[in-house]
Amino acid sequence: MWCNVSFAEYIDWRKCHRAKFATYEQENNGRVEGKWIDDVLTINTDAGIVTRTIFKDSESNKKLSEILSELAGKKMHTNKIQQTIYKIENFAARYITAIYIEESPGTLTEVKLFVNLDKGEFVLQTKIIRTRNTIYGEAGEVGYESEREFKCDENFSQSTDDGQSGSSGTAFFINNRGNLITNNHVVEGCELSKINYFDKEYDTNLISTDKTLDLALLKVDLKPRAFISFSKKEPRKRQLIIVAGYPLGEYLSDDLKINEGKISSLKGFENNSNEITVDLAINPGNSGGPIVDENGQLVAVAVAGMSKEVTEGISFGIKSSAVTNFLKTNKISPDIKLTSFSMNDEKVNQLLEESTVYIFCE
């Protein structure tokens, strides 16, 4: 399960270690210790990659080379600097999941990187999908998994970009008084959230949040060109729905993305009755975006999806009825259409363009 918040952040973590000493296994189960000099994790969420660079001292590098040479029966050398680039898959609030796939003749290795941005911790999960044992001259399918935890020094964050770091997502207007809805995890921890509306930036005021529903109510000092009304109809399976948002933030482009799919279930993750399940490919950055019906009326708010390592095309939205209750507790009555007038694709697109905004954190 992952939430669809997008980040625009560049951080270097230095002096990250699994332990004081790194250890290597020999075939006779002996252990040789060698000290790491540095382990650097560079996170560039704007480009969608995490780079891990390992620096080793000469002694540990020499010992590892000797071990590998003995096992392989030939002279082998290891690099003092090792670098791996992981592709960011998912964002969940201040957590990042990235993946690296290494394929060589007879071997396929998958390495998952789980990063906690707040604590300066990361976990490496290595899965050998298939391998051929060339060292011992044996061939066969072998699969195993291993997991290693790393913690960085207290002052782990060495650098960020020019102050533009922070989360981003999607929000939309619900009335002509400047009220907006988005997800709580999009604005949580932000000192100030801003929106970009027709190439102009506006400061927002946070009115209320609901962490359980994962909703946030904001207000901005402007009258929008359009806003999204709420459907009075209950959602139904196989109902056509349309989602609008800014997947991957402005890294992909600053143009609103509009996609369509269908409702596959009237419950969400773990039987959550406040959510629906949709077959849309909702991506990081879609968080807080509107999910509307063919008439442009709100059906749900995009919130999360299943990790791509589990399945494809399973995402979740918070039902408009739950959003209505949230608004009423804050003394705001959503605009609910009692009648539905058919809108063509062009009009629905225009409505979404004029009511949906890019929201980012400073």
Image: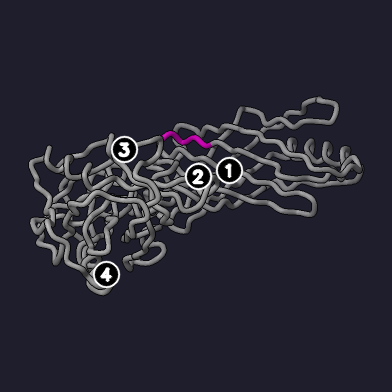
Q: Earlier in the sequence, mark 4 or mark 1?
A: 1
Tag 4 residue: 349
Q: CA distance from mark 2 to mark 1?
A: 7 Å
Kind of residue sitting beneath label 4: Asn
Give the Cα distance between marks 4 and 1.
38 Å
| Residue linked to disc 1 | 112
Residue at 13%, 63% in the rendered image: 224
Q: Badge 1, how many Cα within 10 Å: few under 14, some, many 20+? A: many
- Distance between mark 3 and mark 1 Cα atoms: 32 Å
Picture coordinates of residue 46 (x, y %)?
43, 57
The residue that mark 3 highlights is 273
Query: Can you give x and y, in whole percent of width and height, for residue 319 in the image?
Result: 27, 46
Instruction: Say which residue label 2 marks.
Output: 97
Provide the major secondary structure of the magenta segment.
loop
Which mark is on residue 202? none
Residue contact at pointers 3 and 1, CB within 8 angstroms: no
* Callout 4 secondary element: helix
SS at circle 1: strand
Residue in the image at 28% along x and 34% along y:
212
Nearer to us of marks 3 and 2 is 3
- Residue 79 in the figure: left or right of residue 6: right
Given residues 58 and 168, the one toward you in this image is: 168
| C-beta proximity under 8 Å, tags 2 and 1 | yes
Residue 50 in view here:
yes
Packing grade of label 3 (10 A; few <14, some 14-19, many >=20) is few
Which of pointers 4 and 3 lies earlier in the amino acid sequence? 3
Q: Which residues are magenta?
A: 118-122
Q: Nearer the viewer, mark 4 or mark 3?
A: 3
